Amino acid sequence: MRILIVEDSETLSEALDRRLTQEGYACDVARDGVAALEFLRSYRYDAVVLDLNLPRLDGYGVLRAMGHESGAAPVLVLSAREHVDDRVSALDAGADDYLVKPFVLDELLARLRALVRRPAQRDTPVLRQGELEVDPRSRAARWRGQDLHLTPKEYGLLELLLRRRGATLSRAQIFEHLYDSRSDASDKVVEVIVSTLRTKLARHDIAELIQTRRGFGYVFP
């Protein structure tokens, strides 16, 4: 999952980046609204964490700009403004959720998980393929009830392929989903993640679930 953090406080943005990265998300950080829009034009995100009080262009300006884009990522607003009118204004401007500062990081993570799973899995949050289950809420994958013990990147790859079942995803597309713009890695690392994931799936005789289309990419049929 790829998240855009838009927060002008260096301390808070670094704390969010660190915790979300630990949870297996790929994060980009923008310190003002103009930079946020540049990221949004360049990359596809699964969710945006957005402060309202930003330099150059405030959070409302970002929301208005995102409102003109089809398929825009869901937005979790962070704000010290706690009045009902402030929440209503943000939600009316296009925000999907609103969290008042100061907040507990565990609550922010729970709200993000809820936002990320809404678009594609509003009614069935657990993704299933036969006896394989992928639960975005707990970020766990199970085969016949047994935990597959995946790393964050392996889990991210499996969830992506299962959500986009039937679509062939190129190495570059997968890399963009799993890594942020600051990564020094090459998209060849995707081949390594596919290999280690298949090794873990092979322990349950299901390595063939991920198919390679040579010259095109990978697909979960």
Image (tube, rainbow, N blue to C red):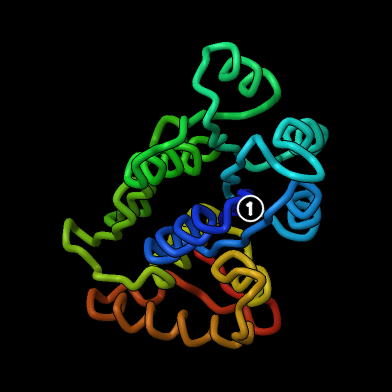
The residue that appears at 68% across and 75% down in the rendered structure is: 172
Residue 20 location, x and y as percent?
44, 58
Quadrant assignment, res 43 = bottom right
Compared to 213, does 90 lie above or below?
above
Quadrant assignment, res 184 = bottom right
Side (left or right) of 126 relative to 47: left
Residue 100 location, x and y as percent?
46, 30
> Which residue corresponds to mark 1?
45
Q: Nearer the viewer, residue 86 or 221?
A: 86
The residue that appears at 78% across and 49% down in the rendered structure is: 37
The residue that appears at 55% across and 25% down in the rendered structure is: 81
Q: Nearer the viewer, residue 154 or 33?
A: 33
Q: Nearer the viewer, residue 129 or 145?
A: 145
The residue that appears at 81% across and 36% down in the rendered structure is: 65
Side (left or right) of 90 relative to 26: right
Residue 40 location, x and y as percent?
74, 52
How many numbered circles does the render carry? Answer: 1
Q: Amino acid at mark 1?
A: Tyr
Residue 161 location, x and y as percent?
51, 62
Side (left or right) of 161 relative to 154: right
Q: Secondary structure at mark 1?
A: loop
